[in-house]
Amino acid sequence: MSLISRISSYLDTLKYSINPEKLRDSEYFLSTYLKLKKDYEELISIRRKIEFLGYQNPYFVIKGIKDAQDPYFRKRAMEKKICFDNIQHAIAAHRIAIGQLVDAMGFEKDGIIYTGHEAIKFTEEGGMGKFIFSPDGVYRLDIFKYLSFSGEYMKTLFSLSKEERENYRKIMEILGEKSKGKSSTKKRIPQEYGMMGPKDHLPFKKDYLYYKRDLYDETIDLGRSPIYDKHIRKVLSIAYAPFGVDAICEDIALFYLKKTYIERKIYGGPFPTIDPEPNEALLGKFYKTVLLKEKMMDTLREMNLKEKNSLVAAISYYLISEDYDKTLLYFSIEKNEFDSALIRIDNYGIVPKENKHLLENIVKSSEKKDITKKFLQELKGARG
């Protein structure tokens, strides 16, 4: 059996389905995670091997050894290319699934919650606790139904409805859109003032008007695609297509909000190879929220004050969206905890003036509670 046949047979064994509902069970969750991780490592090993054998660029011809026009050679090259692409897409699907599970994973023991990689370490060290879904995680486990773990993403794509395929195209466009370039002005130096010309002939600032006709605008590409791995972009787009464009935009926005810059840079989580820098084209209406959160975190750091990233993210979301209930829902925060955080942030003086009105009722309510508490304490002391 040829190597391509063996790889195809192995990929056929990966045509398993994961039931999102069963992931609520800790045993099923952990066994799924371990299986995905094991298969992912095997896929990486296979990719290294076939990369060494030239499967990545099988149409390359060594002069005098292979003839590019040979039908057999071209057929084999096509098979190698398809094999390599399937491996790449299978790896992408596994990376996304593993990232989703890691971000969703949580264990609670003695009032301490272990999430993400801490939860994995907790289980590896034999820790026993209550299995929970991470309150700070960003995950949408229903997309598992649309992840092609065997790499045959085209079958999944063709199974989508017309509306879902349209969503796929829109998501692909969003995830592949580069950061907007900035216009910069450059001076076109005439030939007599080129690098080979005398130094005393170089134009100075006073010559600006004279050379104005030689100015031109150039767009510099300052960024890369929000998710720069094309295979991950494709697999993510297919997986999110049934849920719509808004679903992936919200999830990515929450990822930028709930994770610090360092976390985004080191750990892509459910969105592997994502750009850690906020992208306006990608985040859309959430862009201002992410920028506000980053600004508030920087200010707190300068003031040597510590607040949980998720709390600051929730506050930023509330200040921009002005939706109190949705904030509590999105960030899984208790009302009392959120109100206390809002009051602290207000006391720090880092809330933008245009958003101050959103805190008035909460601060006033808190002041009333403090007055009542103080009165009761004084009354108790007087009676004592």
Image (cartoon, rainbow, N blue to C red):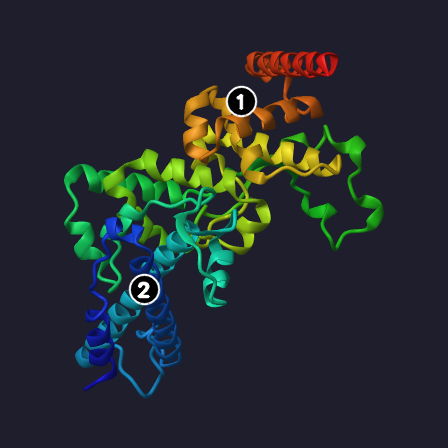
Residue 329 location (% of width, % of height): 41, 31
Residue 57 location (% of width, % of height): 35, 72
Q: Which sits in the foreground, 116 or 143? A: 116
Going 41% across and 26% down the picture, which residue do you hit?
Answer: 326
Relative height, residue 230 to residue 7 (above, below)? above
Q: How crowded is mark 2: few (under 14 residues within 10 Å), some or many (20 or more)?
A: few
The answer to whether residue 73 is visible is no
Residue 88 location (% of width, % of height): 33, 65
Which residue is tagged 2?
31
Q: Picture quarter containing residue 14?
A: bottom left
Describe the element under mark 1 as helix, strand or loop: helix
Work out which quarter of the rendered image holds the N terminus and state it: bottom left
* Cα distance between the residues tagged 1 and 2: 41 Å
Describe the element under mark 2 as helix, strand or loop: helix
**Which residue is at the far right?**
200
Q: Looking at numbered disc 2 in the image, what kind of residue is underneath it? A: Ser
Counting the numbered discs, the total is 2
Residue 319 marker: 1
Work out which quarter of the rendered image holds the C terminus and state it: top right
Q: How crowded is mark 1: few (under 14 residues within 10 Å), some or many (20 or more)?
A: many
Going 15% across and 50% down the picture, which residue do you hit?
Answer: 158
Q: Which sits in the foreground, 326 or 371? A: 371
Q: Which sits in the foreground, 42 or 210? A: 42
Relative height, residue 74 to residue 195 (above, below)? below
The answer to whether residue 126 is visible is yes
Relative height, residue 146 to residue 288 (above, below)? below
Reading the chain from its start, which is encountered first: label 1 or label 2? 2
Q: As drawn, is 16 to the left or to the right of 296? A: left
Check if mark 1's residue and mark 2's residue have beta carbons within 8 Å: no
Relative height, residue 27 to residue 146 (above, below)? below
Residue 203 location (% of width, % of height): 78, 40
Q: Looking at numbered disc 1 in the image, what kind of residue is underneath it? A: Leu
